[in-house]
Image (cartoon, rainbow, N blue to C red):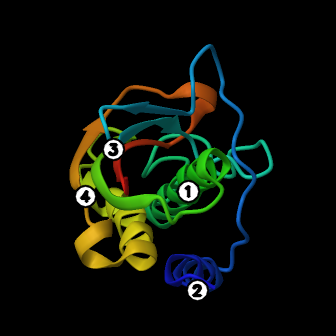
Amino acid sequence: MPETMKNLDEALGKRGLTMPRPPPSGGLYENVREFGPNLAYLSGVLSHVDGKIPHPGKINQEVTVEQAVRAAEICAFNLLANIMEKYGSLDRVKRIVKMTVYVVPADGFYALSQVSNGASQVFVDVFGRENGLAARSTIAVASLVGNGPVEIEVLIELHP
């Protein structure tokens, strides 16, 4: 088994999760769009598990911080599922270049990066620190589709 896939299995096991099916696109867009010689943009995904968001609402109101971190982890695994659907495995991924995390906080909640760290840790666990730790932005928004607390999109570099 290739190292990345072994790391994926360990990352899932550590969190008590199984590999999700790729989430369907929620509109007229592609889940993975290649550009340039070795780059791909992955459209934002929510923390869907079997078509439902386990903990909808605002972070630190209806959603605990721990649930929001878990939602970010699930988003990361959903992104990995989209990569696997497009390329057949994670072996084409050279590194995660950029990650943008959108979070829906309650008034007064400012620990946004704590939520983003959940997804960052998944990518580090799967690809290693050098290839999994991306440049990152975390942006507070008023709402997300389906009342999700977290949405994440990434830019990846591919092996030629």
Q: Position of residue 42 (x, y in %)?
A: 46, 38
Circle 4 packing at 10 Å, graded few (<14), some (14-19), many (20+), is many
Residue type marked 1: Leu
Disc marking residue 38: 3
CA gap between label 2 and label 4 equals: 20 Å
Q: Secondary structure at mark 3?
A: loop
Quarter of the image where one finds residue 88: bottom right
Q: Nearer the viewer, mark 3 or mark 2?
A: 3
Q: Which residue is mark 2?
A: 10
Quarter of the image where one finds residue 116: bottom left
CA gap between label 4 and label 3 equals: 16 Å
Disc marking residue 80: 1
Q: Position of residue 89 (x, y in %)?
A: 61, 62
Circle 2 packing at 10 Å, graded few (<14), some (14-19), many (20+), is some
Disc marking residue 51: none
Q: Secondary structure at mark 2?
A: helix
Residue type marked 4: Ala
Taking the spot 48% from the left edge, 35% from the top edge, the residue there is 44
Q: Which residue is mark 4?
A: 134
Quadrant assignment for the N terminus? bottom right
Asked if 33 appears above or below 53 in the picture, the reply is above
